[in-house]
Amino acid sequence: MTAANGTWRNWARTERVKPQRVERPTSIGAVQRALRAAARGGQRIKAVGAGHSFTGIAVATGVLLELDALSGLVSVDRERSRVTLLAGTRLHQLPALLGPHELALANMGDIDRQSISGAISTGTHGTGARFGGLATQVVGLTLVTADGELLRIDEHENAELLPAAALSLGALGIIVEVTLQCVPEFVLHAVERPAPLDAVLDALHGPEGLVDTSDHFEFYWFPHTRSAVTKTNTRLPAGAPTRPLSRMSAFVDDTLLANGVYGVTCAAGRMVPGIIPTVNGLAERLWSNREFSDRSHRVFATRRTVRFREMEYAVPAADVPAVLRSIDALIEERGWRISFPIEVRFAPADDLWLSTASGRDSGYIAVHRYYREDHREYFEAVEEIMTAHAGRPHWGKLHTRSAADLSALYPQHGAFVALRDRLDPRGLFTNAYLDRVLGTPAGA
């Protein structure tokens, strides 16, 4: 969000900038006018959503476009279960927009504060061996290109660009509309249980594995403990009976414990690191062992108010046990006290050029630190482990990789850069982060 003094900062407080100008367009035409004005003035221009990226991907030193007013439902194709949304629409607004049409997103992440354009552009994902990230649900979008013109990309127009544009890092233009392939609304039956960590790692894959036999499986591991908190969500039809958490139970579990108490314990652990193993064991017991069912969006997403830093890497799914055991050994060897859990999720291979799951079934391993703690030594050491397993960093989360590193990890990295150079030769949409991960535009 942009403060009264004109300074923008992201949610994690890892990035801040005072742009030369802030604009809040209320129409697609206003976006085009803002872009053309920036181009005439030789200014770079970036659109921002909710600021939930930990990286500098949305930092705008020139013109910052806040798209909050460019929000809502444009059209619904009931026959094909597709919806077109304005780019600034927040994910948490979608249930109210899709519900009257009995539609839902096929999969979601565990946070729903992002804008739809920001979420697809950074590779936001949930978990599930058969259900890809949000960008895999994109079947069309409209960009304002560097010359201020509209570029429609879908199965009828410029279809060859969709695998690049659906997850574009904001490097190809300003997204103003997104068309999503939805599914009939559904219920999720959630089971959250503790289990021995080694048993979970040994049972992840295979015909009877936890990942392949579940619709949506993930787990958390609190360092300094020997068990995991598993979360298994099973899809049921919309008419299935629901048994949601009571209002009091939801408040106690998700607000009081997961945010209030945990925020206090993180702060205490920063002051007295020696208490962290005990705190982690307590948190693990408090957060696990419950069962409920509800509409999909209410199960997928949870509210998190404890501020943190995060790094997440996608590795080949089969490598997850080895990577996690290496991180465990690293933490013990260094004598660190890590208060935040490590989150592990899964996604199927897809064909998007810059998707972290492009061409391979992937396991996502996310490490965190409380925002008042120095994360750098921990993250850098974990990053070395990820790199040894051909890990791909999440575009919206902290990492140190460069274009040279990433070009070896993504078969289509060069093709994407060539497309970016064609659509934005002067680097109107670039910034320091994009220059690092893509290289400087040819004509900039």
Image (cartoon, rainbow, N blue to C red):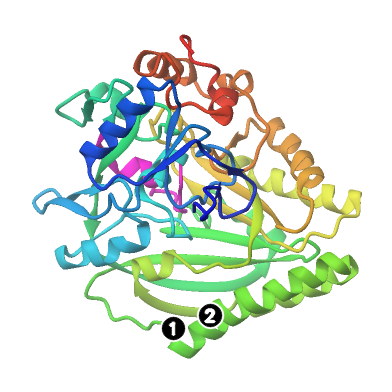
Residues at badges 2 and 1 in contact (C-beta under 8 Å)?
yes
Helix, strand or loop at mark 2: strand
* Range drawn in magenta: 123-142
Q: Which residue is mark 1?
A: 245
- Of all residues, the one furthest to the top in this rendering is 443
Residue 2, relative to residue 357: is it above or below?
below
| 35 in magenta | no
Is residue 414 in sight in this rendering?
yes
Q: State how many labels appear.
A: 2
Residue 65, relative to residue 209: is it above or below?
above
- Of all residues, the one furthest to the left in this rendering is 79
Q: Is residue 142 left or right of residue 209?
A: left
Q: Which residue is mark 2?
A: 290
- Residue visible at 68% across and 74% down? 262
> Horizontal and vertical percent for residue 9?
57, 49
- The residue nearer to you, when weighing 256 against 189, is 256
